[in-house]
Image: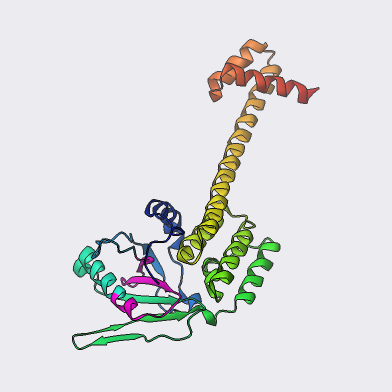
Amino acid sequence: MEKKKNKSEITYHNKDVLSKIMAENFREKSLKVYGIDVPKIKQVLPTNLPAIHVNEMRIDNLFLLEDGSVAIIDYESSVKWENYLKYLNYIVRILERYGQEAKHIRMIVIYTADVEHAADVFHVDCLTLRLEQAYLRKIDSKSVRDGLEKKLENGLPLSDDEMMQFIILPLTYKGREAKKEAVKDAVNLAKRITDKEKQMFVLSGILVFADKMIDSGTARYIKEVIRMTQVAQMLLEEGREEGREEGKAEEIIGMGQEFGLDDAAILKRLQERIGLSLENAAVYLERYRKQSV
């Protein structure tokens, strides 16, 4: 995948934010649904490794797997000789960062539906680079999408494998325009995931994985959906907290009235026991009276 600067690409700062969202959720996930038979992911590693060239961008994904191996993952929509040099640079950077701790490095290349075949070995006299490759053209896009939609329609939770399929789904389509439309469709489908943590993982994954395949407008659209999802989650949490607070307030008011306390005494108890301001305490007292009429 060409690493030249593109306005649609996620800035390093935003990628860091999304990586934090994805890090916990990637643990114990399997790459087998992409056609790669390697151990499950144990940890997400930072991709801001020592740069060999000033204009070099970061590795797409870097994982520590359960067998202790380090998996470098790059996504490609075309086959180029220069890509193999890029992979070698990645490996050198891993060794610079982790030294002898990186005893086993896997160079994994995931090809979008645009690629049918690529050499899995790069050889010159002094070295041989062996790649582990996956071809997303082998994935039945329609079948995967329909399966995800059916589960969401029936309110069923998504499995780990299904979430991994979800975030890679747009790359299983051939051609830039088809991918762009597939990204929007996947994002709209992801809006229907009721588990907000899983929803954030899927949305973040779609944006990070399809970053270099989409234009700036599509990227902005996804980021806006993510932002609104975060806002909705905060409002939900606030609503839950308010509900708990209101329940406590009703209990205190009810007991106060049973014991014949006047309004001033009840307001004081609300302030002391659940930390309400005098104004908020008065609101709860008035609301309780209206409900009791």
Residue 117: x and y, percent? 45, 86
> With respect to residue 214, does 284 lie above or below?
above
Examine the image and state in which quarter residue 239 appears: top right
Residue 251 seen anywhere in this rendered image of the structure: yes
**Left or right: 216 in relation to 91:** right
Residue extent of the magenta highlight: 59-85
Quarter of the N terminus within the rendering: bottom left
Where is 230 relative to 216, above or below? above
Furthest residue to the right? 293
Q: Quadrant of residue 73?
A: bottom left
Does the magenta segment cover residue 62? Answer: yes
Compared across the picture, whether 152 is left or right of 16 comes to: right
User: Which of the two residues, 267 or 6, is positioned nearer the viewer here?
Assistant: 6
Q: Residue at x 41, y 53 (%)?
A: 20
The picture places residue 64, in percent across and down from the top left corner, at: 34, 67
Residue 255 in view here: no
Picture coordinates of residue 116, whole percent (x, y): 48, 85
In this rendering, position of residue 293 left or right of residue 49: right
In the rendered view, would you say 144 is above or below 260? Answer: below
